[in-house]
Amino acid sequence: MEQAFEFFFGAYFGVSPWLVGLEMTAVFLGVLSVWFAHKERILVFPTGFISTGIFVYILWVYGLLGDMIINGYYSAMSIYGWWFWWYKKTVQHAPQISRVASNEWRKAGYLFIGAIFFVVCVYQYFGMFHVWTAYVDTLTTAIFFVAMWLMAKKKWEHWHFWIVGNLISIPLYWYKGLTFTAFQYILFTIIAVLGYQSWKKNLSNSPPHSLK
């Protein structure tokens, strides 16, 4: 039992209880946020904003710049998504789940490439490409940048990006010593699969959208 505990949580020995408590809070709110996304609830954004805001601080303490950047981006996109869903609902009509149009795929591609370029510049500036995780961080950052943008636009395909990015992040965070965060990404993956199925069903019941 003691060996199992050390295997799962040994990375936290010597870490401030305050920091561990913050991570657990951020993980709880993060899982809650993804669950709200699965249910198409606008609460996905305020809970996600608080969770990612906490992670910005935690990742800054751990020196994980790529992860810190992406969580800062999440916070900004949470504000945008919150406004977009609320505005569409109150001023026009509730936004419907839709497919990504061809011009949006181009924008997603530009965002993906731009995110990679930005993170590479940051990591290069701080001399952090001496570890292999930096290269994986660059990839997951780009994947999640696209996922968050598409989610804010209420596009069904955003779940594809979340699932892929989550699966990569599970062993990555485990290796980095953030065990609770690794467990979070396991739950993220499960909920993302449920969300994928739920949104796909709702997509079939939504009025057709132009794919120009």
Image (cartoon, rainbow, N blue to C red):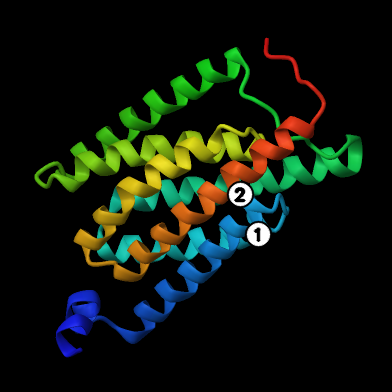
Amino acid under disc 2:
Ser
Q: Could you tell whether 71 is left or right of 62 in the image?
A: right
- Label 2 Cα crowd, 10 Å radius (few <14 / some 14-19 / many 20+): many
The residue drawn where x is 37% and y is 24% is 113
**Residues at badges 2 and 1 in contact (C-beta under 8 Å)?**
yes
Task: Tell which residue pokes out farthest to the left in this image.
Answer: 130
Residue 46 badge:
1
Asked if residue 15 is positioned above or below residue 184 in the image, the reply reads below
Judging by the rendered image, the residue that carries numbered circle 2 is 78
Rendering coords of residue 34 (x, y %):
57, 56
Q: Could you tell whether 194 is left or right of 89 in the image?
A: left
The residue drawn where x is 52% and y is 62% is 30
Quadrant of image for the N terminus? bottom left
Q: Could you tell whether 59 is left or right of 80 in the image?
A: left
- Label 1 Cα crowd, 10 Å radius (few <14 / some 14-19 / many 20+): some
Splitting the image into 4 quarters, where does residue 13 fall?
bottom left
Amino acid under disc 1:
Pro
